[in-house]
Amino acid sequence: MLEVYKVTKGMMPNAPWVMLLWFAVPLVVFLLIAFFFQNSIFGWIIWSLIGIMFGLLGAMFVLGRRAEKAAYLRIEGQPGATGAALNSIRRGWNIEQEPVAIDPRTKDMVFRAVGRGGVVLVAEGPANRVQKLLRDEERKTARVLPNVPILLFITGNGDQELEIPLPKLARTIQRIKPVLTKAEVPAVVNRLHALQRVKLPIPKGIDPTRMRPDRKAMRGR
């Protein structure tokens, strides 16, 4: 907890003051209750302890939320941050650990999650550039899963189409309404994995970008 507090304070200097406020408000409320309704020292002690417990709960709640936000601030803009955000989803979704599509030139990526809400594809990169990579992956997925909903997102500041801020990504996906049954989700995952397996790897030692045609063979020699 101390380490979490230090990291959070480093990213958000006002976090200690917010935690103190959330601790003080319940304590003051319960002390006022004791002042107006209690005449014994024992009553004061009981209400003070209750106020301290609620104050600590409030401070821990604020620390947890601020620590989560600080964690997103630390990884935002780094390659693979979208995958890290998806992996924060605790249950109900099957998250691919590696991106399902990568542009080798720009390093843009597409990550995938499968759950009762359907298939979610999340692109990482500039919205105006990553659209093609995202749409290509959507078409590939739709060919093998024509009746399964496919939802598209792009991590960003939320100003352009499909964009969603990184801290809101996990909560947005968890709120998607279910359309598949629990039994259908594994079947969808298996079909997508089968699609990935049929992609033949490039033989080692061959760089298709540097291959040149055999001109003698083309002339029939």
Image (tube, grey):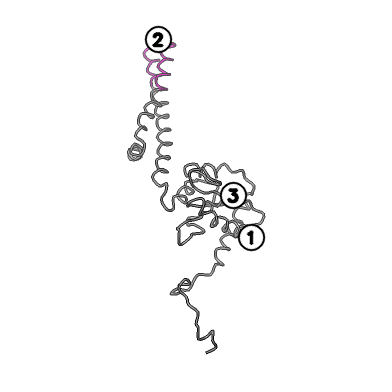
The tag earlier along the polypeptide, 1 or 3, is 1
Q: Position of residue 11 (x, y in %)?
A: 36, 39
Q: Label the magenta part by its dominant secondary structure.
A: helix
Q: Amino acid at mark 3?
A: Leu
Q: Position of residue 64 (x, y in %)?
A: 42, 36
Instruction: Indicate whether residue 44 is drawn in magenta.
Output: yes
Residue wearing tag 3: 151
Q: Quadrant of the N terminus?
A: top left
Residue wearing tag 2: 39
Q: Residues within 10 Å of mark 1 (few under 14, many from 20)?
A: few
Of residue 125 and residue 29, the one placed in the foreground of this image is 125
Distance between mark 2 and mark 1 Cα atoms = 75 Å
SS state under label 3: strand
The tag earlier along the polypeptide, 2 or 1, is 2
Q: Position of residue 219 (x, y in %)?
A: 54, 86
- Looking at this view, name the residue that lies furthest to the right: 147
- Looking at this view, name the residue that lies furthest to the bottom: 221
Q: Amino acid at mark 1?
A: Arg
Q: Which span is picked out in magenta? A: 25-48
Residue wearing tag 1: 143
SS state under label 1: helix
Instruction: Indicate whether residue 151 is drawn in magenta.
Output: no
Of residue 73 and residue 171, the one placed in the foreground of this image is 73
